Amino acid sequence: MSTSTNLKIFCVDDELFTLQLSEQVLKNMAFHDVSIFQNGNECLAHLNENPDVVFLDYNMNGMNGLDVLKEIKKYNPSIYVVMLSAQTNKDITLESIDYGAFTFMKKEGNLRDNLTTIMEKIAPRVSAVQSFLSLTSGASKPQRFSRA
């Protein structure tokens, strides 16, 4: 995953311990551009920073994760959003996927293993898109040649 560590990642959760733990796990995985937010409004206020991946808690004070997901997808549908929750309501899981979440991760088990598994799936996809965009942005510029 070393070629994918330039991803911008947001973690959104109203539980400060979970936020800090997620941030540390991701940084230990060599993802250094990680921002944490304690509610959905803070996250939405920073969308102009163009995150590649958002780990988003479902149950939060204020806006719930599903409402935040909808706003993220309106802003940029290509942002990978991973919903997180301790809840087990399958309807919420399915609704999150319907609105564009990449996956729904339950807050159980080993957080490091769960984040590693998800980032192994997402990081190569985002890196491929970034590579493609860097190639096409250079190709669209007109070439200037000088006569020698």
Image (cartoon, grey):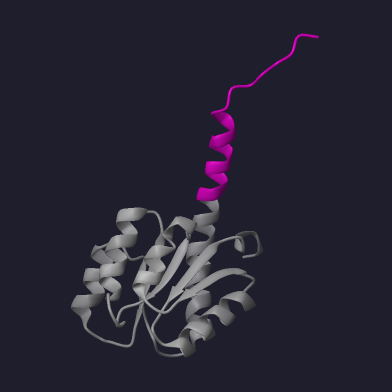
Above or below: residue 99 compared with residue 14 = above
> x, y (%) of residue 96?
26, 69
User: Percent position (x, y) of residue 47?
Assistant: 42, 60
**Seen in the image, is 129 located left or right of residue 99?**
right
Q: Is residue 8 left or right of residue 37?
A: right
Can residue 143 be found in the magenta stretch?
yes
> Residue pushed farthest top?
147
Corner quadrant of residue 32: bottom right
Which region is colored magenta? 129-148
Counting labels gives 0
Q: Residue furthest left?
A: 91
Q: Please tell me which residue is depicted at 53% across the width and 84% down the height of the picture.
A: 20
User: Quarter of the image containing the N terminus?
Assistant: bottom right
Hey, which quadrant is residue 108 in on the image?
bottom left
Residue shown at 21%/70% (left/top)? Answer: 95
Image position of 56 with respect to 79: above or below: below
Percent x, y of residue 67: 25, 69
Q: Residue at 31% x, 66% y: name it.
A: 69
Instruction: Establish if 135 lies above or below 76.
Output: above
Which residue is at the front of the view, 80 or 114? 80
The residue positioned 57% from the left and 46% from the top of the image is 131
**Quarter of the image where the C terminus is located:** top right
Q: Is residue 141 magenta?
A: yes
78 and 10: which is toward the camera:
10
Expressed as whole percent of the image width and height from the top left, the position of residue 123 reads 53, 62
